[in-house]
Image: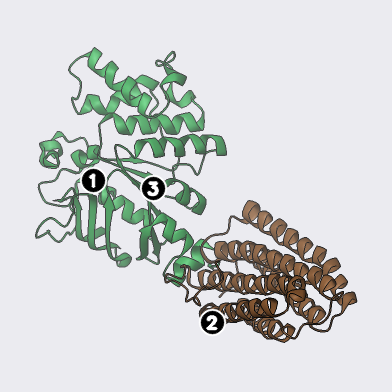
Chain colours: A green, B brown
Amino acid sequence: MEQFSAAGAERGQMPASMMTTPTVKSSAGSLVSAATKVSARDVNVFYGDKQALFDVSLDIPDRSVTAFIGPSGCGKTTFLRCINRMNDTIDGCRVQGTLQIEGKDAYAKNVDPVVLRTRVGMVFQKPNPFPKSIYENVAYGPRIHNMAKSKADMDVIVEKSLRRAGLWEEVKDRLAQPGTGLSGGQQQRLVIARTVAVNPDVILMDEPCSALDPIATAKIEELIDEMRENYCIIIVTHSMAQAARVSQKTAFFHMGKLVETGPTEEIFTNPRDSRTQDYITGRFG
Amino acid sequence: MAEHTVKAFTEELDALTQEVARMGGLAEAAVNDSLAAVVRRDTELAQLVMQRDARIDAAQREVEKRAIKLFALRQPMASDLRVVLTAWRIAGELERVGDLAKNIAKRALVLNQSEPIQLIRSVDRMGKIAGDHLKQVLDAYANKDVQSAISVWNNDDNIDAHYNSLFRELLTYMIEDPRTISSCAHLLFIAKNIERIGDHGTNIAEYIHFLVTGEEIATQRPRAEAETGD
């Protein structure tokens, strides 16, 4: 995580609003155990006067999938966006507490959010390929971070990333065609390829299948299952069944609070908190 | 517990539980009637028990059909998942209880053709305990009463002890009068069937514990010392 302190902020690639340093309590030391990738302690988030998250403390393991579930407005996406400091981009958003990635404070003053986001990639609800070729979509990140010394190097990165995203065989003969010409499911896998191209440690997924049909969803879920061998994956989903299928750990949020967290199998068979019970059995509201 | 946002889901779960309760009533009646057929030497009642077993089998199929539909269409989770799983498992136990009652009724038909044996009263006592346990555990299921279920679970050794005692008595009886061997052997099988009904009752008690708490009963169930080679 030393890369966080690289001088990326001086490159001027991010809008000024993204450079805003939220109010963060500096960490006294590492909170993480060997298997923990992301560790949050007493994280509070405010949008202006409104508090969106209350004292969230959570350890997220490496090389596994952690699902955030909860009703709309419960704070799960807000917390997800804390992990790669996407909330920095929102005016009036304040983040308090401690959030560490591999034991390093993600909100330390010397951390460049741009560099942080190469380590913590994000996939959004709707596929958002750049209006460029399939090749350029994947090559964009490695290029701006100078990860390839030559065209041959870049070719290797693009192929490896597309293979990791399970898309190579489908697009290898049309890499020069626009990424926007792919189907919705293919576009989402292209976005995943773009995310893994910069070799992140953590991949955040915010409802990555909500715009996809069941077949494309199944392909993404299969991909998530394969990718967990190499990455710490955190997924926000409204689909209980998807959370149950793809994750090993589940965290349930409600009204800005982390209500319960545990092995997915336990959360979906025998949750401890009645609010979790009511939510996953469809009794809320 | 609050209703589901989709009320039909709650209704379907309730209907499943009610079907299991109805099946429990049929199984309970089959046990009581089969024992009455033995004690009162009532051939007609024994035949009725045998005929009615088809109703218990049909009830089990109905429970399974409803459970499959719930799994496929509602994807139950947490406590709902346990409701469906428990219904399925209890229906299986009750179907076996029905079969055992039918076996008892079949042996009643044979026993009614021989001279009466005094030991039938011991079988009757044992049968009443097993019948009471079955009733208690089915009430515990209807009321989700885990304490009552645990009470049944703890007391099954009472039935086991009766079985061991009856086993010894029947051996003595057969040694004293070899002409009773055939009837005593049938009574021994009946006693074994009753003991098995008690075991199914304890299984149901375990499922109720799982249904209510989400956890299996962790400890070993107390058992009367086996003297019968089982």
Kind of residue indicated by mark 1: Met
Q: CA distance from mark 3 to mark 1?
A: 23 Å
Task: From the viewer's perspective, tell me whether residue B200 is left or right of residue A191.
Answer: right
For residue B149, say whether it is visible: no
Q: Position of residue B58 (x, y in %)?
A: 79, 61
Chain under callout 3: A
Asked if disc 3 and disc 1 are in contact, CB closer than 8 Å, the reply is no
Kind of residue indicated by mark 2: Asn
For residue B155, the mark is: 2
Q: CA distance from mark 3 to mark 2?
A: 49 Å
Q: Which SS class for mark 3? A: strand
Q: Nearer the viewer, residue A264 or B90?
A: B90
Task: From the viewer's perspective, tell me whether residue B1 is left or right of residue A126.
Answer: right
Chain under callout 1: A
Quadrant assignment for the N terminus of chain B: bottom right
Q: Position of residue A41 (x, y in %)?
A: 22, 62
Instruction: Identify the mark nearer the N-term, 3 or 1.
Output: 1
Q: Which residue is mark 1?
A: A18
The picture quadrant where one finds residue B76 is bottom right
